[in-house]
Amino acid sequence: MAAGPTGTKTNPPSEQLTLTFTSNSGAASIRRKTMQPKQPSKRRPSTPRAEAKKGGATRRGLSAEALGKQQRDISVSEFFAKNRHLLGFDNKRKALLTTVKEAVDNSLDACEEAGILPDIDIRVKQVDQDRFTVMVRDNGPGIVRQQIPNIFGKLLYGSKFHRLKMSRGQQGIGISAAGMYGLITTGKPVHILSKTGPRAQAHDYTLAIDTRKNKPDIIRDQEIEVEWSRGTQVTIELQAGYNKGRQSVDEYLELTAIANPHAQFVYHPPVGATVEFPRGTDELPDETREIKPHPYGIELGTFMKMIKESGAKNLGPFLAGEFSRVSPTVAKKVCGGAGLTTRTYLGTITPPVAERVYTVLQNTKLKAPSTDCLAPIGAESILTGLLKEIKAEFYTASTRPPSVYRGNPFQIEVGLAYGGELGSDHRDGDENGNGKGERTQSRVIRFANRVPLLYQQSSCCTFKAVTDTKWNNYSLSQSSGSMPQAPMVILIHMASVWVPFISEGKEAIADYDEIRKEVKLGIAECGRRLGILLRRKRKKVAHSKRRDVFTRYIDEVVEATRSMAVINKEEFRRSLVTLSKTYTAQADMEFDDHGKVIKKKKQQPGNDLGLADTIVVDREGGEEDNGTLFTEVANSISPMKAKGKRSSGRGTKKTKRKR
Amino acid sequence: MIIMAKKAKKTTKAKSKRPTKRGNGSTEKKIEGLATSVVEMAHRQQDPAIAIPTRALSNVAFNEKTRHVEMGENKQSRNFFNYGQAKRFMQTMLVASKCKDLIELGKTASIRQIYYLAKHTIKGTKEKTFDDQSESDPIIEDLEVAIDSLREELHVFASNRGNLAGYITLVDAGSTLDCTAMGSAGYAVPSICEPDVIQFKKCDAKFILHVEKDTVWRRFHEDRFWETHKCIISHGGGQPARGMRRLLRRMHEELKLPVFVLLDNDPWGYYIYSVIKHGSINLAYESRRMAIPDAKFIGVSSFDYDRCDMTDDVKIELDANDVKRAKQIANYPWFASKRPWQREIKKMLSNGFKMEVEAMISKDLSYLTEQYVPMKLKDKKQWLD
């Protein structure tokens, strides 16, 4: 079903649950569903098969009445308890990751909405062979007492689902599902501590989830004193597995730190030393605005539901008020186009009429949705994040202008980190000019609204964009249709009010043409900059090699010539050395547009390529202290024009000489 | 009229003023001239360069009068102060100096020995002047064309390749050899077959049958084909080396023996025939000494599959490379104007398979020597020119 969660995003939770359930569980379970005469849209789900069974006794002798007794409501909680893989709890290892992820995402969202620089403490402790406790504490605004049970003990409860606003969480499933998973696998309830301010008392809750009713089951509720001044702490015990490496909690936190340089994390892993991810910037991301849905992104069913539930009485105000980019003038035009007026009473609109209005609306030319609801990480912050977590040599980042898919605004950001400790390119030799570097696959790190995506990489739209890109154009090697082979990390971030995930587990972005195109453009921009660096680097290497080669061979040539003819050996040698100097000197000179020699400028720290949003770190020039390196370089980021005079002048000169 | 092969590759017309007079002065002098010109260029503060005639299809012309593939006028300049050419320049100078040494000492060396003579580690580095013999072999050929001297004149020879047997008695380096009594392996043809090394003493053969490979040749030799047909049988071990080609040419020219060629039915076989008949592209400057324009191709033809009623078992499918190569060969100027050859190549492409000479053995062990070849030799219409 194409609609998925998007189509039903304005539904109240209970309806969402039935719809989601229908779409995910298939025909087998439809039979068990209770008919709800209240809802006209639900009146027709009886399939021909169901009808056949009701019409008289079936083979097994069950009457419609007997069957009816078996049919009953299914709660979301029950559904997800059985289908936990949909939420990212397919295996023990992933369960641990998902739990940490949901808790951290909630903390970050809460802090940012409250305008607080996030300071998050993550503790994962192993209590038994396959049993862990996850504790996540933030310095966020805390949660008011009455809401704690609902937020942590009820699925599909939250502040983020009913609005179109960029945030990490979307559906309100995450943390409560984690709690439920813990309860199912260990029998231990969720423990929450929350404090809303320095003077407030901390609430200490212990919650279980009643899966049958999708309701919190409060086990203990008391007020206690804690030593921290504000924030929320959630502790979940669960059956899990811990590994390091790819798709681990460690990787998730590393990537989160890259995409959220304004946050600080302290991570206590089950084994090994505490890891700190320091804050890279004190600037909070821009606050995002909530927006109304754009008509192009609305399905007919949703449209009808909006008509029914709207507070407006007349069609005109409804259109102009409930949608973005529909002005009263446009609304009037749409009403006219459908043969109605702006005054048409909403209550009189029958489904066929609604469909007519919908069609007219879809065919009306509308402005693209406003994009100020998006808060991209920003090129500078991406660079900051990459710099502090990845020890590369070259960094660049690019933020694409906002774009729209199916009426939803989105924005793509791409960052590249190349070389340094990531390894050397197999195309380039080592320092002695001999041999080749090792072959390393690049790595893609994907983010959606600043949340790292760790699974299902190959089905993700962003990954496809990476393999689609012709990296050979940027001086990297790549066999067609696969990842480029280079010591490189490719960061791709999609910011959107509604990120189209392939599944509820939020692991891969659906492959919309518009999205893929934007990602590719972003990659191209960064790739071009990397290509400039690489070409320049290789040219430099070639030049020094050239100098070496000539001096290396001069003696050989002199000796060989001497045994062929009677010559003045020293004189010949001197001539060759002079010649070699003139030839290599020419290669070392740089020329401006008029062919004049440019005297070498003093090397600036960081970026001497003249490229925007790009940092080059000289990692060979002695190991610098991490902190100072970072601040020094971060200050030197200056948005310059992309085309440096020097580079173009030099290029033309070189080709001339070749001829 | 001279038809230039199309497909121009990147060649630069030589600008060097190196003397290119042929036959003027000994090889020794020519090498000396090469060295002095390099030194002079350096003293004039010019990039020292050697002009080397291009050895590629782009610089090869078919002379319709002599029916030789001849080398054109294009030259490539090999410069020292060019990053891509510096090493090869140095190598050329090294090989030239080693040849000069050989001439002075009055000794000869094989191309492999030249490789070892010129190979050493460059002072102060780990780099070797040559990494592999495949680097020095083309340099020797470059040197041959650059100073317009033959390999023999540079005192260089290649390993022996090719054998012959039959009604000929020749003198090789003073020994008289009767090729009807050379045992099972026949007479091994040396790399240098110039009159000062080999002289013909007596010849009763009526023609020469040249086959592609040793194994096929063995079949003919064992079946005493040369005895029953009063001929000479020879093979070149694939594409015949210069020694074999030179000997064939001399026997053809001096003893007036017609040459018949029996090769595999594949693009490679066509090319071997073309090399024997007109000369090779790589060694086009040698054509005038080696080409046998009157040589005839007697098989295996693409039409022989039907003609000889062969079975499916002998088919070897053409791969993409074969198809490409066959089309290339069909476009060579010396094939392009020949209708029968165009038909032959087209037939192979439409067959979609190739056949080895050994395919004929699938009928009977002696079918090849007792029926197929005699049938081919008798019927002039089946020859391809």
Image: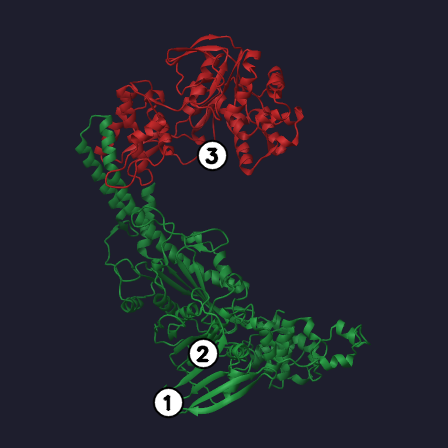
Chain colours: A green, B red
Name the residue located 27 percent from the left edge and 51 percent from the top edge.
Answer: A590
Discs 2/3, front: 2
Rendered-image quadrant of the N terminus of chain A = bottom right
Question: Do the residues indicated by labels 2 and 3 lie within the same chain of the protein?
Answer: no
Residue A405, by quadrant, is bottom right
How crowded is the residue under tag 3: few (<14 C-alpha within 10 Å), some, or many (20+)? few
Spatial CA span between label 1 and label 2: 21 Å
Name the residue located 54 percent from the left edge and 34 percent from the top edge.
Answer: B322
Q: What is the x, y in percent for residue A483?
A: 47, 56
Q: Give the SS element for disc 1.
A: loop
- Determine which residue is flagged by label 1: A198
Q: What is the x, y in percent for residue A251?
A: 42, 67
In the rendered view, would you say B357 is above or below A394? above
Discs 3/1, front: 1
Residue B212 in sight here:
no
Discs 1/2, front: 1
Amino acid under disc 2 = Asp
- Determine which residue is flagged by label 3: B7
> Mark 2 or mark 1, which is nearer the start of the sequence?
2
Amino acid under disc 3 = Lys
How crowded is the residue under tag 1: few (<14 C-alpha within 10 Å), some, or many (20+)? few
Spatial CA span between label 2 and label 3: 66 Å
Q: What is the x, y in percent for residue A338?
A: 66, 76
In the image, B330 versus B275, the foreground residue is B275
In the image, B117 versus A603, the foreground residue is B117
Amino acid under disc 1 = Pro
Instruction: Name the subunit of mark 1.
Output: A
- Determine which residue is flagged by label 2: A109
Instruction: Name the subunit of mark 3.
Output: B
Rendered-image quadrant of the C terminus of chain A = top left
Name the residue located 34 percent from the left edge and 50 percent from the top edge.
Answer: A538
Spatial CA span between label 3 and label 1: 85 Å
